[in-house]
Image (cartoon, helix red, strand yellow):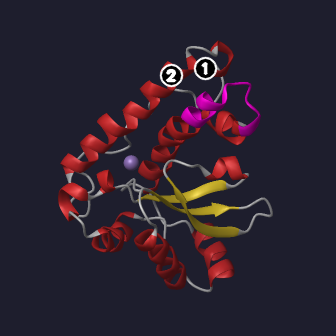
Amino acid sequence: MKLELPALPFEYNALEPYMDAETVEVHYDKHHRGYLTKLLGVLENYPELKTREIEDLLKNLNTLEVSDSDRVKIKNLGGGFYNHVVFWEAMNPENEKNSELISDIEKDFGSVEEFKQKFSQLAKTHFGSGWAWLVKNGEGKLEIYSLPNQDCPLTLGHTPVLALDVWEHAYYLKYKNKRDEFVDAWWNLIKLL
Ligand code: MN3
């Protein structure tokens, strides 16, 4: 994916009532856009990196020829840009059940319900800002974990499948401090399962 903000694949109000239009608008147009804008600012010093794809930058984060402080910025801002794309795509109301993903989940977690419980638990108990992730590891097996801040599984050599943003900006306007309610409601937006 190029370093350009993809259009949100649905209207701001398309996720009501589980995610309110104001939250989606601020989250996409301010937070998500802001990560990309700031990333491009950092990359002004590295013209060659500006031409590369975001996945490439995050996979090779630890070997990029940049200063240590810029590496941290690229991790935070590049992750912030990429992670939100995964987040929005997974909630697209046009998504259809993905039978291949469902059978992989059944193989690796027993059942979709067991998977949802474990993933929800991670999202609810992650301390501070971060994300819950479902990824495919290097052996092609599904794994779940949470990561802090905007850390991205691509940097660990994993391929993101599903992502749930548990930064307060993802839910605070509607759910206030009740992250648990937000996590439970979020599954209604995941048509893939
Ligand atoms: Mn966010």
- What is the quadrant of residue 147 in the picture? bottom right
Mark 2 or mark 1, which has the lower sequence index? 2
The disc at residue 2 is none
- For label 2, being within 8 Å of ligand 1 is answered no
Real-space Cα separation, disc 2 to disc 1, in angstroms? 7 Å
Give, as a single range, the part of the protein colored magenta: 62-74
Q: Secondary structure at mark 1?
A: helix
Q: Is residue 149 visible to the viewer in this orientation of the structure?
A: yes
Q: Amino acid at mark 2?
A: Leu
Residue wearing tag 1: 50
Question: Which residue lies at the image location 58% right of the left edge and 33% below the top edge?
Answer: 74
In front of the other: 181 or 101: 181
Q: How would you classify the magenta stretch by its main secondary structure?
A: helix
* Residue 33 against residue 172 in the figure, above or below: above
Question: Which residue lies at the image location 37% right of the left edge and 55% below the top edge?
Answer: 167
Using residue 127 as the reference point, say whether residue 48 is left or right of it: right
Task: Provide residue 47's location: percent of width, then percent of height.
Answer: 63, 13
Q: Residues within 10 Å of mark 2 (few under 14, many from 20)?
A: many
Labels 2 & 1 near each other (Cβ < 8 A): yes
Residue wearing tag 2: 40
